[in-house]
């Protein structure tokens, strides 16, 4: 078995997602739970394709909705470099849940986290990135009456009281065990988990958190302490990691140019990167590919189409069959992905140019934002 590692700050190796479900004590997203979700709205391709693969208490959140109590949504982004497509995916599914379940959405922008966690990144550098990140998130078109986006260093006055209550319940030994903190860890990052837990307590309803599975350690701690603070244990849905273009190991990283598709990449760059770097499950030569076929399980272009972009399940099955049999070549498969990706990015970049006005609503002037500032 290959070795792998998943923490909020490090993801390495070829990840065995079934093993993660066991190790973290989460549950798989089964066909049964997808059928319940489907009663409320057409399933998003990231749910149908298995990109979101694991959960905690999603069933209870859905029960709460059916009983009329509802739930609220919470997710976040810690600026540390240009946003790549993997960073946007939790926000896209959050928007889907907001549309289907009419839920409030809270977006945390911890503009201190990566300063504390990473060597060599200054607060000033982070401050330069924050606005662009918020524009990317805002361009998805969340409901302005039901969405609040906040930066930790700006909203801290309203978070500090609940944060100290949370912090008092987390011991060093828990933090060491869950996050792997050592004697070298600075006390800033030692306190930070309290701040990431606070938004799960913003309403007296169950909080549902879409994120990649690296963020689960926070929710594990939250679930140990929430009830003693008079709140619900957080529910979560976990995604896999978008692998780097270059292969199925680890996660796409902002700091390695050729492994990532950034949200601001232009169509030519996308085409070049996919053609040059996207890991192929195809044969070494056309002849060999025609004879033996390709392996969709490791092929990055296939995986992206399947988990993120191809809305038509019938078409996806055809692509799988044709790639396996060798009828469809790697280059042709890559072109399919390039076309879908560029269409997606073109729309995203256009919306981003128009998102300025929305940012003000989400952060200050919208109904939910005003309520949060008034406390
Ligand atoms: P951050 O900024 O590292 O990542 C933002 C979101 O993207 C997910 N993610 C990925 N998903 C797929 N493939 C990848 N390669 C990949 N890399 C990152 C992360 O899981 C995250 O959902 N501590 C958080 C910020 C945060 C937060 C939250 C996240 C604050 N509150 C609540 C989720 C929910 C962070 O550093 O995310």
Image (cartoon, rainbow, N blue to C red):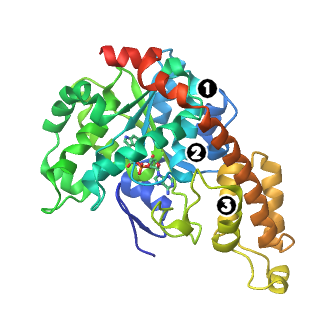
- Distance from disc 3 to disc 2, alpha carbons, whole Å, reads 34 Å
According to the picture, the residue beneath numbered tag 3 turns out to be: 270
According to the picture, the residue beneath numbered tag 2 turns out to be: 30
Please name whichever residue, 176 or 76, is drawn nearer the observer in this view of the structure. 76
- Distance from disc 2 to disc 1, alpha carbons, whole Å, reads 19 Å
For marks 2 and 1, the one nearer the N-term is 2
For marks 3 and 1, the one nearer the N-term is 1
From the top left corner, tell me how far across and down residue 238 is, in percent: 48, 47
Q: Judging from the image, what secondary structure is the residue with disc 1 in?
A: helix
Q: Residue at x 29, y 25 (%)?
A: 231
**Disc 2 packing (10 Å; few <14; some 14–19; many ≥20):** few
Q: Quadrant of residue 321?
A: bottom right
Looking at the image, residue 191 lies above or below residue 255: above
From the top left corner, tell me how far across and down residue 2 is, in percent: 45, 75
For marks 3 and 2, the one nearer the N-term is 2
According to the picture, the residue beneath numbered tag 1 turns out to be: 100
Please name whichever residue, 18 or 318, is drawn nearer the observer in this view of the structure. 318
């Amino acid at each position: 078995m290959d070795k792998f590692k998943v923490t909020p700050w490090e993801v390495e190796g070829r990840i065995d997602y079934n093993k993660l479900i066991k190790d973290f004590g989460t549950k798989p997203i089964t066909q049964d739970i997808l059928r319940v979700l489907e009663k409320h709205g057409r399933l998003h391709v990231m749910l149908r394709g298995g990109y979101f693969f694991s959960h905690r208490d999603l069933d209870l959140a859905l029960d709460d909705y059916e009983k009329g109590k509802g739930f609220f949504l919470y997710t976040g982004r810690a600026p540390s470099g240009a946003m790549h497509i993997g960073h946007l995916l939790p926000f896209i599914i959050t928007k889907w849940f907001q549309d289907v379940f009419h839920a409030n959405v809270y977006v945390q922008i911890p503009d201190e986290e990566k300063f504390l966690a990473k060597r060599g990144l200054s607060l000033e550098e982070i401050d330069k990135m924050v606005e662009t990140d918020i524009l990317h998130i805002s361009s998805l078109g969340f409901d302005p009456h039901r969405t609040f986006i906040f930066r930790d260093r700006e909203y801290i006055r309203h978070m500090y009281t609940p944060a100290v209550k949370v912090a008092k319940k987390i011991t060093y030994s828990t933090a060491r065990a869950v996050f792997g903190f050592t004697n070298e860890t600075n006390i800033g990052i030692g306190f930070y988990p309290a701040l990431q837990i606070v938004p799960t307590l913003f309403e007296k309803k169950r909080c549902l958190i879409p994120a990649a599975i690296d963020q689960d350690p926070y929710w594990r701690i939250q679930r140990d302490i929430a009830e003693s603070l008079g709140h619900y244990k957080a529910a979560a849905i976990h995604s896999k990691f978008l692998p780097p273009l270059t292969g199925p190991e680890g996660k796409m990283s902002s700091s390695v140019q050729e492994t990532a598709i950034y949200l601001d990449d232009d169509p030519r760059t996308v085409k070049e990167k996919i053609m040059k770097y996207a890991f192929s499950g195809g044969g070494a030569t056309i002849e060999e590919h025609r004879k033996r076929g390709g392996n969709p399980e490791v092929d990055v272009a296939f995986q992206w189409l399947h988990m993120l972009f191809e809305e038509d399940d019938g078409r996806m099955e055809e692509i799988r069959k044709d790639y396996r049999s060798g009828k469809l070549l790697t280059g042709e498969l890559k072109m399919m992905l390039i076309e879908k990706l560029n269409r997606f990015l073109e729309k995203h970049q256009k919306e981003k140019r128009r998102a300025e006005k929305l940012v003000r609503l989400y952060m200050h002037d919208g109904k939910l934002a005003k309520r949060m500032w008034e406390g």
